[in-house]
Image: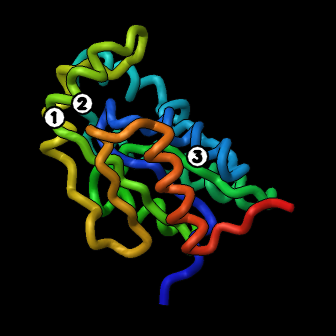
């Protein structure tokens, strides 16, 4: 039996709109945004900035930090919305271990759209040259429990956030009174 969804991960490759959708969704739902990129250790940021893809070992400590933050926000009685690429099933399982009611919103888009968007993010550590490696690593979560897939190529941030909000309401989101 599925738990009601008490927290969300907005996931997908770089450029899919995780942060923008998270911010809009938090406005709609009163949830608390957790920006996953801010939890990367300096070594990970240096690697990505140099155009070197992260491996499982690089991501392990980062995922542990994200789990700790999900639990911390949840323990305060808040509803966390985490942005995280969560590219592999094993990474999502690590995150699921943090909270039993963790849902995933997968923002799908094409490699071309992702590369175009990433090339227009000045100052971000993730270069567009890593887009291909992200798609090569991506294991689609479609079919996994408590997972919603949305087409991020052809819908606005507002549309995506609204769809995620409605889905979350249907799966257990309790609005603050």
Please, is residue 17 above or below residue 172 in the view?
above
Residue extending furthest right?
177
Residue at 13% across / 33% down in the picture? 132
Local packing at callout 2 (Cα closer than 10 Å; few below 14, some 14-19, many 20+) is many
**Structural distance between the alpha carbons of marks 1 and 3:** 24 Å
Along the viewing direction, whichever of 161 and 82 lies nearer the viewer: 161
The residues tagged by marks 3 and 2 sit, at their Cα atoms, a distance apart of 21 Å
Q: Which residue is mark 1?
A: 111
Q: Position of residue 114 (x, y in %)?
A: 24, 30
> Which of the 4 image quarters holds residue 91?
bottom left
Estimate the spatial distance between the alpha carbons at disc 2 and disc 1, rounded to whole Å.
Answer: 5 Å
Q: In the rendered image, which quarter is residue 50 located in?
A: top left
Q: Are marks 1 and 3 in contact (CB under 8 Å)?
A: no
Residue 131 x/y as whole percent:
20, 30
Please tell me whether mark 1 sits on a helix, a strand or a loop. Answer: helix
Tag 1: Cα neighbours inside 10 Å, few (<14), some, or many (≥20)? some
For marks 3 and 2, give the one nearer the viewer. Answer: 3
Q: Decide: is 65 above or below 103.
A: above
Q: Residue at x 55, y 36 (%)?
A: 35
Q: Nearer the viewer, mark 1 or mark 3?
A: 3
Alpha-carbon neighbours of circle 3 within 10 Å: few (<14), some, or many (≥20)? many
Q: Residue at x 56, y 57 (%)?
A: 165
Which residue does the numbered mark 2 point to in the structure image? 114
Single out the residue that lies furthest toward the bottom: 1
SS state under label 2: helix
Q: Secondary structure at mark 3?
A: helix
Q: Indicate the position of residue 149 as horizontal and vertical percent values.
A: 33, 58
Colouring scheme, one of rainbow, by chain, secondary structure, one colour: rainbow
Q: Which residue is mark 3?
A: 25
């Amino acid at each position: 039996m599925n738990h009601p969804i008490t927290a969300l991960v907005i996931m997908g490759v770089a450029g899919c709109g995780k942060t923008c959708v998270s911010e809009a969704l938090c406005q709609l739902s009163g949830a608390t945004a957790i920006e996953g990129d801010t939890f990367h250790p300096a070594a990970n940021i240096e690697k990505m900035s140099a155009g070197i893809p992260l491996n499982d070992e690089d991501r392990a400590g980062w995922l542990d930090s994200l789990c700790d933050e999900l639990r911390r926000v949840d323990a305060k009685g808040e509803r966390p919305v985490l942005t995280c690429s969560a590219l592999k099933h094993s990474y999502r399982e690590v995150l699921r271990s943090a909270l039993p009611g963790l849902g995933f919103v997968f923002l799908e888009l094409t490699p071309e759209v992702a590369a175009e968007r990433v090339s227009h993010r000045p100052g971000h550590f993730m270069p567009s040259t890593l887009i291909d490696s992200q798609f090569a690593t991506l294991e689609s979560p479609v079919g996994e429990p408590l997972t919603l897939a949305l087409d991020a190529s052809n819908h606005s941030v507002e549309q995506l956030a609204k769809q995620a909000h409605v889905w979350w309401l249907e799966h257990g989101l309790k609005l603050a009174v």
